[in-house]
């Protein structure tokens, strides 16, 4: 069992220093009286500007690892002293909930398989809500024009300039995912975490969504960690990591 790593040239600018380091991470969930171990001591480095794909079967721990990287969850308490999730010079396992909220608002963008758009808001409002989360209501007022302009620019880039006032229910699946990607990018994150971003789409639409992510990543110098079970998607990335039964090991 273990990781197999493959490196490719994708045209991205990858710096030698890691932006993210994960060490000795374990994660177990409790379902009723049953403990379900998911991760069994994961080590991972991601360089700045790199696109790393985490490849594995359903239930292998891919999404759990992504949630730990994004500060949505914490490693098992019994291993907290040895476990480390470090983003630049920040040790995330030691940060408060408030600090992790700030980390996600400032440095991280999330794209999920399901879009999680707010049905009562327009397309433009769904994207700008990320700016409101970052700045708060009062701060948002001061930065509103800048945020709206950026949101409009992202939506235009993703081919949705004609959809700004539409609600999510009026969009196709591919259009909804493009809105979700724009929302993830509104605060200009350093690291984009994508969990099966094309898994809920047909092949043609999924390819167009992936192309949109790749193009923006190259232009912005964004670091990308993507979870998938699709070998075709993994083949496009700089490096592939295979996660098997919650364990990783360099080949």
Image (tube, rainbow, N blue to C red):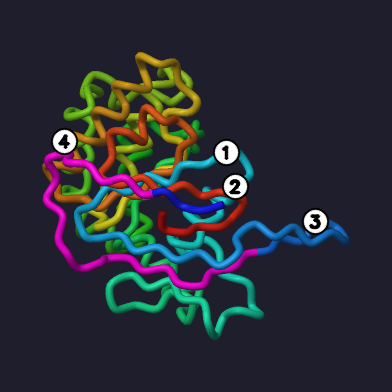
Q: Are marks 1 and 2 in contact (CB under 8 Å)?
A: yes
Quarter of the image containing the C terminus?
bottom left
Who is closer to the viewer here, 213 or 226?
226
User: Looking at the image, is mark 4 or mark 1 earlier in the sequence?
Assistant: 1
Regarding mark 3 in the picture, which secondary structure is present there? strand
- Residue 213 sits in which quadrant? top left
User: Looking at the image, is mark 3 or mark 1 earlier in the sequence?
Assistant: 3
3D distance between C-alphas at marks 1 and 2: 6 Å
Q: Are marks 3 and 4 in contact (CB under 8 Å)?
A: no
3D distance between C-alphas at marks 4 and 1: 36 Å
Which residue is at a point 46% across and 76% down the rendered structure image?
A: 84
Closer to viewer: mark 3 or mark 4:
3
Residue 39 on the magenta segment: no
User: Looking at the image, is mark 2 or mark 3 earlier in the sequence?
Assistant: 3
- Residue 201 sits in which quadrant? top left
Regarding mark 1 in the picture, which secondary structure is present there? loop
**Magenta stretch, residue numbers:** 5-27
3D distance between C-alphas at marks 3 and 1: 21 Å
Residue pointed to by mark 1: 57
Q: Eyeballing the image, is 165 above or below 15?
A: above
Residue pointed to by mark 4: 153
- In the rendered image, residue 111, in percent from the top left (x then y), is placed at 40, 42
Q: Does residue 137 show up?
A: no
Residue pointed to by mark 2: 60
3D distance between C-alphas at marks 3 and 4: 44 Å
- In the rendered image, residue 112, in percent from the top left (x then y), is placed at 46, 40
Q: Are marks 3 and 1 in contact (CB under 8 Å)?
A: no
Closer to viewer: mark 3 or mark 1:
1
Image mark for residue 31 = 3
Regarding mark 4 in the picture, which secondary structure is present there? helix
């Amino acid at each position: 069992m273990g990781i197999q790593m493959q490196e490719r040239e994708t045209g991205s600018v990858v710096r030698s220093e890691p932006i993210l380091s994960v060490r000795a991470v374990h994660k177990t969930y409790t379902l009723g009286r049953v403990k379900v171990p998911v991760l069994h001591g994961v080590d991972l480095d991601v360089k700045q500007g790199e696109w790393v794909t985490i490849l594995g079967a359903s239930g292998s721990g891919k999404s759990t690892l992504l949630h730990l990287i994004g500060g949505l969850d914490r490693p098992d308490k019994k291993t907290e002293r040895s476990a480390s999730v470090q983003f630049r010079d920040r040790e995330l396992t030691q940060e408060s909930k408030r600090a992790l909220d700030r980390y996600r608002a400032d440095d991280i963008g999330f794209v999920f398989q399901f879009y999680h758009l707010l049905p009562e808001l327009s397309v433009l409002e769904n994207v700008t809500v990320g700016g409101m989360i970052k700045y708060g209501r009062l701060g948002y007022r001061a930065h509103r024009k800048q945020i709206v302009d950026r949101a409009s620019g992202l939506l235009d880039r993703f081919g949705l300039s004609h959809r700004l006032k539409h609600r999510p229910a009026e969009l196709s699946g591919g259009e909804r995912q493009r809105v979700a990607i724009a929302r993830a990018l509104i605060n200009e994150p350093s690291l984009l975490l994508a969990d099966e971003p094309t898994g809920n789409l047909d092949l043609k639409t999924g390819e167009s969504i992936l192309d949109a992510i790749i193009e923006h990543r190259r232009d912005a110098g964004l670091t990308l960690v993507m979870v998938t079970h699709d070998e075709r998607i993994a083949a496009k990335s700089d490096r592939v990591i295979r996660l098997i039964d919650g364990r990783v090991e360099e080949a």
